[in-house]
Amino acid sequence: MTKRKIEILELVFSDAELIDIDFSSWDKHISFIVKSDHYKSHYTKDGFFVPIINLKFSGITDVHFEFSHHEKNSLEDDPDKHYHWIIDQSTIDKNGKHYRLSFFQSGVMPKVSISFKDVEIEEMDHKYFDRVNPQWEKQNAGLARPSINKLYGIVAGKR
């Protein structure tokens, strides 16, 4: 992995919102998809543009999620409301041929740690998320890609 990729990971996770986790090709890679205004954000005629970045990790040996929101969850009584998954801190260490990245925000946000060999970094168009879930950017919407049950309801016109 290049020094530039490490710098980009540190920049992205200095202020990001996790909007999707893609395990669909878990045997080859896992993607964490984030919005990050510290990565190439800019003003357009329509307002402030924050890019969506697909971080596709490969050579994964470990992924760990640590959840600490249960005691502080103010949205617990409303099943349709969710926190936006905010990240503003990260660490990255090299251990032999692998790297260990941890990203988190203190408080109610989960902490993720992943051990990997390499990462591909690519921008994604907002329209892909808009087509799957037009509500994905709304307050308390949760992750951009809903569960299969909710997705089926959206596709079938039941939601």
Image: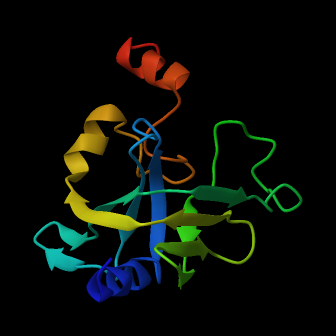
Check the image and report above or below for 63 versus 153.
below
Near-viewer residue (116 or 89) = 116
- Say which quarter of the image contains residue 61: bottom right
- Say which quarter of the image contains residue 47: bottom left
Q: Position of residue 106 (x, y in %)?
A: 71, 78
Check the image and report above or below for 147 versus 81.
above
Q: Is residue 59 left or right of residue 52?
A: right
- Say which quarter of the image contains residue 109: bottom right
Q: Position of residue 36 (x, y in %)?
A: 37, 72
Q: Is residue 153 left or right of residue 35?
A: right
Q: Residue furthest right?
A: 71
Q: Position of residue 138 (x, y in %)?
A: 45, 50
Check the image and report above or below for 84 versus 158.
below
Q: Residue at x 24, y 52 (%)?
A: 126
Q: Residue at x 34, y 77 (%)?
A: 37
Near-viewer residue (142 or 53) = 53
